[in-house]
Image (cartoon, rainbow, N blue to C red):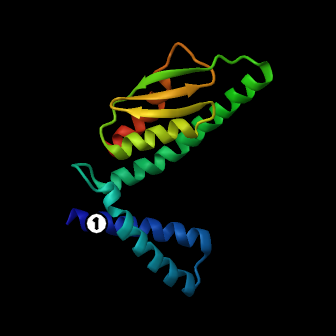
Amino acid sequence: MRSRFDFIALFLVFLSVWLLLTGLTLEEIIVGSLASIIITILSYRLFSFGEKQYTKRFFLLLAYIPWFVYQEILSHLDVIYRIITGRIKPAIIEVKHNMKSDLGIMTLANSITLTPGTLTLDVDEGKFFVHWINIKPDRKNIAQRFERFLKRIWD
C-alpha cells in the first residue's frame, strides 16, 4: 500500500513541475501526464530500496539541489579570489568518505568534481583522490559538506 502512495506522489510531483513549466492547456495536461507516468516508471526504483521511503528520499534530493548550488556559489567566489590574488596551493589529497551505496559514492564524487577548484581523480574503497586548487588543513570539509545530505538520500 505504501509503495502505491509513493508512486502516485512522485507522479503528481512530476506532473506539477511539468504544468508549472508549460501551462494548463488540455494538450499540455495530456502530454504532461504521459511524460510523468513514463518518468515515474523509469525513476521509481532509483529511490525505493532499503527501509527508507521513496517520497522522503525524493524530497531530500530536492532539498540537496539548493544546498549544492549554494556550495557552488561559494566555491566560485573562492576560485575568483584565488585568480585575482594568485594565492593558490594546489595538491592532490586523499579524502575519506562513509558512503556505502555505489550511487551515493558516484553522486558524492560528482558533487566534488562539479564544485570549482576541485576534481575527483580516483575513487577507491572508502576514499577519493581529489585535486584541490588551494589545500587547507581541514581536508574533510570537501566531502563532509555534501556527504551529510547524500547519506540520508542514498545510504
- Point 50% across, 33% down: residue: 121
- Residue 1, horizontal then vertical, whole percent: 19, 66
- Point 49% across, 69% down: residue: 16
Dot 1 falls on a residue whose secondary structure is helix
The C terminus lies in quadrant:
top left
Hey, which residue is sitting farthest top in the picture?
137
Name the side, left or right, on which 102 lies relative to 17. Answer: left
> Is 91 rendered above or below residue 146?
above
User: Around disc 1, counting alpha carbons within 10 Å, would you say few (fewer than 14), some (14 to 19), or many (20 or more)?
Assistant: few
> Is 104 rendered above or below residue 138?
below
- Residue 152, horizontal then vertical, whole percent: 34, 41
- Residue 39, horizontal then vertical, whole percent: 42, 69
Name the side, left or right, on which 6 lies relative to 24. Answer: left
**Which sits in the foreground, 112 or 29?**
112
Q: Which residue is mark 1?
A: 5
Name the side, left or right, on which 89 lies relative to 8. Answer: right
- Residue 52, horizontal then vertical, whole percent: 26, 49
Q: Amino acid at mark 1?
A: Phe
Which of the 4 quarters of the picture holds residue 48? bottom left
Which of the 4 quarters of the picture holds residue 118? top right
- Point 61% across, 37% down: residue: 72
Name the side, left or right, on which 36 lies relative to 51. Answer: right
**Which sits in the foreground, 142 or 19?**
142
Which of the 4 quarters of the picture holds residue 9? bottom left
**Which sits in the foreground, 57 or 117?**
117
